């Protein structure tokens, strides 16, 4: 990217707008955190269970967050810090947002960060990412309530069915995501298998030995051992 | 919430669950979820408007429309399918948070599932919904803290990492997805195997790649419900 465009992409007004976006997300996180903590005792969840959920969320999010941060850093040079922060760090994900950026640059007739990537090209990219990403936001803002009423009907009819649908949806999604992530090659397959095996082992151990904190650390530990295994395989 | 739901909870929850608590939770979740989403939609429009009209770099509506239509043609179907697909696992509060904070499959869902697992909450129960919401809320805040400190610290923090650690992060996705699959497969080995078989078959099928995940979710739900049809009738 030429230095004028880079200066624009990292200019103070864009930073301020990125921080407005960040503030909204932080605000929402805190509101839902407080709301959940307040509701917990009313539905028979002990304060130990609340603490355990929070602790688990914290431990489990560290690996994914660093993974996201590494992608963010690799894209800083293409889109500047504020836009990368607001689009890829939060709101979207690396895959969808880089696709939007690529399409935006393409309709302008240039390559992302390539020759001819001027201020107008950058503006086109920002429009594509920002409008494209609102699709999900508008749909969830409008229709989550309808999904909620539909769920209530199902639960009222058959609570067990809802539990099964919930588990099956998760299994289906992760069956696909795991398969897809493992198509990268043998090291990726090794990573996925080790991570799944470590997870099952830790679940088994925490039940047998009755140590509950193992469950809180399970995903974090599985992640580290899985990634290490994948890396070791890749340098063999 | 009906009596069936209470019945499911009764196994692990000694205290009588009050419907009012969860109804109030949903009411407030809808209000704050919608408010923050609409605020964010407005905030998202600020940067392009500023670049186009504040600074005068407007590339022309034709180009912008071409970009948006090109993107929508490629991914627009996911605007509708993703929220519906993930809703049964995320719940109301989880949906509002996950779509606002992004990174749903690689962060929000795994953290929600891990939190539910840590306290032994069965999916679909009130406890699971609150535990999942707590997991996602914390994950969202941690993610922002990590990303901001890394961006503000420049890429310095990342360059300080040993090269091996950075290379190992190339494998972060199969590690996350494998781990979550392992967690669910431990409790339901048969369903875990079915889901993985469906996933592998669909990955290599010549289907439009974006809807592959939806197909896997629908197929897995259908097969699980079919296999459990006897248990469901007794419930």
Image (spheres, coloured by chain):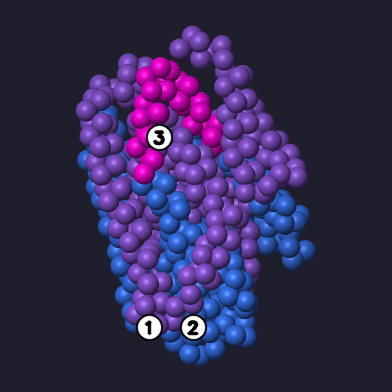
**Tag 1's secondary structure?**
loop
* Up-down relation of residue A152 to residue B76 (above or below): above
For label 3, the crowd category at 10 Å Cα-Cα, with few meaning under 14, some 14 to 19 and many 20 or more, is some
For label 1, the crowd category at 10 Å Cα-Cα, with few meaning under 14, some 14 to 19 and many 20 or more, is few
| Location of residue B58 by image quarter | bottom left
Q: Is residue A43 left or right of residue B85?
A: left
Counting from the top left corner in percent of width and height, residue A187 is at 72, 57
Q: Which residue is mark 1?
A: B55
Respond whether the residues carrying marks 1 and 2 are from the same subunit. Answer: no
Q: Residue at x 37, y 66 (%)?
A: B45
Which one is closest to the eye, mark 1 or mark 3?
1
Letter of the chain in blue? A
Q: What mark, if any, has residue A119 been given in the picture?
A: 2
Q: Which residue is mark 3?
A: A147
Q: Earlier in the sequence, mark 2 or mark 3?
A: 2
Q: Chain of mark 2?
A: A
**Magenta stretch in the rendered image:** A142-171
- Magenta stretch encompasses residue A17: no
Q: Chain of mark 1?
A: B
Q: Are marks 1 and 2 in contact (CB under 8 Å)?
A: yes
Residue nearer the viewer, B20 or B16 = B20
Q: Count the labels in the image.
A: 3
Q: Is residue B207 left or right of residue B24?
A: right
Q: Are marks 1 and 3 in contact (CB under 8 Å)?
A: no
Counting from the top left corner in percent of width and height, residue A35 is at 25, 44
Q: Residue at x 70, y 55 (%)?
A: A188
Question: Which colour denotes chain B?
Answer: purple
Q: Is residue B46 left or right of residue A218?
A: left
Main SS, magenta residues: helix
- Magenta stretch encompasses residue A156: yes
* Up-down relation of residue B214 to residue A163 (above or below): below
């Amino acid at each position: 990217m030429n230095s004028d465009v880079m200066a624009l992409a990292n200019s103070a007004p864009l930073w301020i707008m990125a921080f407005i976006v960040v503030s909204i997300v932080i605000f929402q996180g805190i509101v839902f955190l407080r709301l959940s903590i307040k509701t917990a005792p009313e539905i028979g969840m002990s304060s130990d269970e609340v603490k355990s959920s929070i602790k688990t969320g914290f431990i489990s999010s560290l690996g994914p967050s660093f993974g996201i941060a590494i992608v963010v850093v690799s894209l800083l040079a293409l889109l500047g810090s504020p836009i990368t922060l607001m689009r890829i760090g939060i709101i979207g994900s690396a895959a969808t947002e880089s696709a939007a950026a690529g399409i935006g640059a393409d309709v302008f007739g240039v390559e992302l960060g390539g020759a001819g990537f001027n201020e107008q090209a950058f503006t086109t990219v920002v429009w594509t990412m920002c409008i494209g990403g609102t699709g999900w936001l508008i749909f969830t803002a409008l229709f989550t309530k309808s999904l909620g009423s539909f769920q209530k009907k199902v639960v009222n009819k058959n609570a067990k069915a809802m539990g099964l649908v919930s588990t099956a949806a998760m299994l289906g999604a992760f069956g696909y995501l795991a398969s897809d992530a493992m198509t990268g090659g043998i090291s990726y397959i090794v990573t996925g298998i080790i991570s799944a095996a470590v997870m099952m082992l830790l679940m088994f151990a925490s039940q047998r030995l009755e140590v509950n904190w193992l469950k809180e650390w399970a995903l974090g530990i599985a992640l580290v051992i899985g990634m290490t295994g994948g890396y070791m395989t890749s340098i063999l | 919430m009906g009596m069936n739901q209470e019945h499911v909870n009764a196994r692990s929850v000694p205290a009588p669950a009050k419907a009012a608590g969860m109804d109030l939770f949903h009411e407030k979740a809808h209000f704050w979820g919608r408010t923050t989403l609409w605020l964010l939609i407005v905030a998202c429009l600020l940067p392009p408007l500023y670049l186009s009209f504040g600074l005068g770099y407007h590339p022309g509506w034709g180009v912008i429309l071409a970009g948006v239509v090109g993107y929508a043609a490629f991914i627009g179907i996911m605007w509708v399918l993703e929220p519906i697909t993930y809703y049964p696992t995320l719940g109301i509060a989880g949906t509002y948070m996950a779509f606002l904070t992004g990174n749903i499959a690689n962060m929000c869902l795994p953290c929600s599932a891990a939190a539910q697992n840590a306290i032994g909450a069965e999916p679909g129960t009130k406890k699971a919904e609150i535990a999942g919401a707590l997991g996602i809320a914390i994950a969202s805040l941690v993610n922002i803290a990590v990303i901001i400190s890394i961006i503000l610290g420049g890429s310095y923090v990342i360059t300080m990492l040993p090269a091996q650690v950075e290379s190992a992060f190339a494998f972060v996705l199969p590690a996350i997805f494998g781990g979550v699959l392992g967690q669910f497969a431990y409790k339901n080995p048969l369903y875990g195997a079915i889901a993985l078989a469906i996933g592998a078959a669909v990955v290599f099928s010549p289907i439009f790649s974006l809807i592959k995940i939806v197909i896997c979710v629908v197929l897995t739900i259908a097969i699980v419900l079919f296999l459990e049809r006897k248990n469901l009738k007794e419930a």
